[in-house]
Structure formats: structure tokens, C-alpha cells
Amino acid sequence: MTKIEPRSQAPAERTANDPDLPELIARCQAGDQSAFATLYERHAPALYRLAYSVLLVEQDAEDVLQESMVYAFRNLNRYDPARGAFRTWLYTITISRCRNARRRKWLPTITLGHLLSLGVEPPTPAAESPEVRAAWQELRASLAEALHTLSPRLREAVALRYGQGLTYREMAEIMGCPQKTAESRVRLAHEQLRKAMSAADQAALEELWSI
């Protein structure tokens, strides 16, 4: 099936859902602390989810969040609306800081239970029967084990595609690779996840994630 990517947005369109962004940036550059606070509160939760989805360690994700926001605030003059959305610029900074964090130390292997509640988990089923809840918990556990088998770069791809809902074009810009490479990483992640999961769990995940 041919993948249809959304068309590129013009600068004006990119601020349609964030109409006060130019004003907030101008106020930040003038030293307005309330504008800094507004931008932080608006974007920090998504950046933390992204960082944690990649690093799998809460303190490291928090550190990356702080480093990313400080860098962004100090370099707002470098943001160019003509090149992409503000969130894409922030995601690019965050992914870069995540990679730096991985290089700084060997991150321990931990459970992915928190990851599954921070962006890449399948949606909670609406039905409340014990059977449905038990099946969903089993799927979450299976996905947790399967995500553990992915390399950091493939986990980045999963976090951006399913945790943040980005297009392949946006992913490529953030990960610093061609769009085909972004697509390939998601495809490789799918293959590894399938190998690590039972047939029944594969079918459920494919339906929920539409993969």
C-alpha cells in the first residue's frame, strides 16, 4: 500500500495551531519570564515523553528535557519558521541531547513499564470486561519485552512515529537522515517487534498501531 504523507506546510500554516508563537518568541527574546513559562508548560510534557521513550531512564529524560529547553530558550533566534514547525525544531534538539546522553554513559537495562504509559503504548480499550483488561495487560507486557530488543536508533523511530505521531518527513528532519532511512528504521522496528511477540499479540498490535 502506498504511503501518503501530508503535504509540506507553509510557515503561516505551521503556526495555525500555535497562533501566539511569534509573539511568545518575541517576548522571550525581550526577557519576559511569563513567556518562557508559557512555552515551557506547552512543550515540556511532549519533550519529556520523547526523551524517556528513547532513554528509558527517568532522571536522564528529565536532564535531557532541561538541557533541551535551556538550549532552545538561549537560541530562539536560530528558529526559522520557513524550515519547519517549532515542535519539530524542539524534537530535533531533544533527540540530539538524547544521543549525547547515551554517549556520556552506559544506560542500564530497565523495565519499560513507564515507557508504555508515556507515549507508545496501545490505547486503553473502551470495554471494561475482565477478559479485555487481561488481554490488554498481556499485550502491554509483550510489547514491553519486544521494545527492549530494539536498538536506540530504532527506538527513536518508534517513539517519533507512534509516540509523537510524526510523518516520515518530520522524522527524517529530526533524526538527521533521509526520509527513506526513517521509513526503513520503522520497518526494521516492526520486523524486530514481530519476531519478539506472539502471533496473537502481533495481530493486536498491528490493528491498534495500523502497521
Image (cartoon, grey):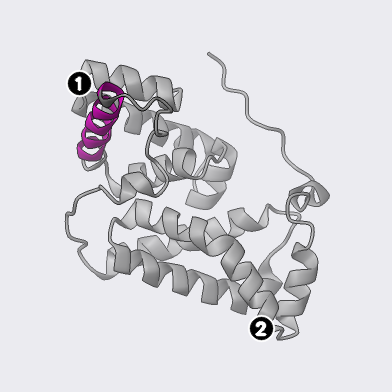
Q: Which dot marks residue 160?
A: none
Label 2 and label 1: CA atoms lie apart by: 51 Å
Q: Main secondary structure of the magenta part?
A: helix
Local secondary structure at mark 1 = loop
The segment highlighted magenta reads: 131-146
> Which quadrant holds residue 37?
bottom right
The answer to whether residue 103 is above or below residue 121 is below
Residue at the extreme right of the image, as rendered: 12
User: Residue 132 in magenta?
Assistant: yes
Local secondary structure at mark 2 = helix
Residue underneath mark 1: 198
> Which of 174/22 is in front?
22
Classed neighbour count for the residue bearing mark 2: other residues with Cα under 10 Å, few (<14), some (14–19), many (≥20): few
User: Residue 4 in magenta?
Assistant: no
Image quarter of the C terminus: top left
Instruction: Find residue 184 and report its horizontal and vertical position in percent.
Output: 42, 32
Counting the numbered discs, the total is: 2
Which residue corresponds to the image point at 78% horizontal and 66% vertical from the top-left? 22
The answer to whether residue 88 is above or below residue 202 is below
Classed neighbour count for the residue bearing mark 1: other residues with Cα under 10 Å, few (<14), some (14–19), many (≥20): few
Which residue corresponds to the image point at 30% horizontal and 51% vertical from the top-left? 114
Q: Which callout, 2 or 1, points at the residue further toward the start of the chain?
A: 2
Residue underneath mark 2: 33
Instruction: Find residue 43 and report its horizontal and vertical position in percent.
Output: 57, 61
Q: Is residue 75 visible?
A: no
Residue at the extreme front of the image, as rendered: 129
Instruction: Find residue 62 and report its horizontal and vertical position in percent.
Output: 38, 68
Three-letter amino acid code at the position of disc 1? Ser
Q: Is residue 90 visible?
A: yes
Residue at the extreme bottom of the image, as rendered: 31
Say whether residue 14 is left or right of residue 89.
right
Say whether residue 154 is left or right of residue 4.
left
